[in-house]
Amino acid sequence: MNKAQDKKDLALLENTHPPKCETHLVHLDNVRSIQAQILAPDKAQQMAEVFGVLADPNRLRLISALFAQELCVCDLAALTKMTESAVSHQLRLLKAMRLVSYRREGKNVYYSLADNHIVNLYCSLSQHLDE
């Protein structure tokens, strides 16, 4: 547990008070029109698990490297200054969530982002943070 980060998160929550309604009137038309579009609990759980896997700086650095091009474990380890074992472990988690895929070429295994959905997710978040 990172106590410094926990304190920063708590301070952020304490210092922000989102505006809220002064009345407690439920707008039934709005609720009914959106109800069918809200995430089902099982899909929300799946999405939370994916975001949980993404909530790691080392994994995000691996994803950023793979965004540039497909790479083998050795190259990823050199780029991120992680051990090959640590990179392999992180890639195993990313692969389990279908965020990365791999291909064999002779004795080498090359990893890449699984599909355009992952590329778009990475790009969108990166651009959002740059704004």
Image (cartoon, rainbow, N blue to C red):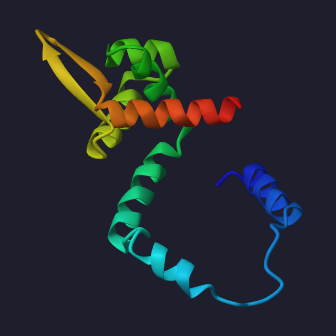
28, 11: nearer the viewer: 28
Quarter of image, res 6: bottom right
Q: Position of residue 131 (x, y in %)?
A: 71, 32
Residue 29's place in the image compared with 9, above or below, is below
Specify the quadrant of the image occupied by residue 17: bottom right
Q: Residue furthest top?
A: 106
Q: Describe residue 107's horizontal placement relative to residue 26 as left or right.
A: left
Q: Residue at x 85, y 62 (%)?
A: 16
User: In the image, what residue occupies the spot 43% across and 33% down?
Assistant: 120
Q: Position of residue 47 (x, y in %)?
A: 40, 57
Q: Residue at x 45, y 37 (%)?
A: 121
Is 45 placed above or below 108 here? below
- Between residues 26 and 72, which one lies in front from this camera angle? 26
Where residue 15 appears, x then y in whole percent?
Answer: 88, 61
- 97 relative position to 57: left or right: left
Give the left or right position of residue 49, taking residue 123 as reference.
left
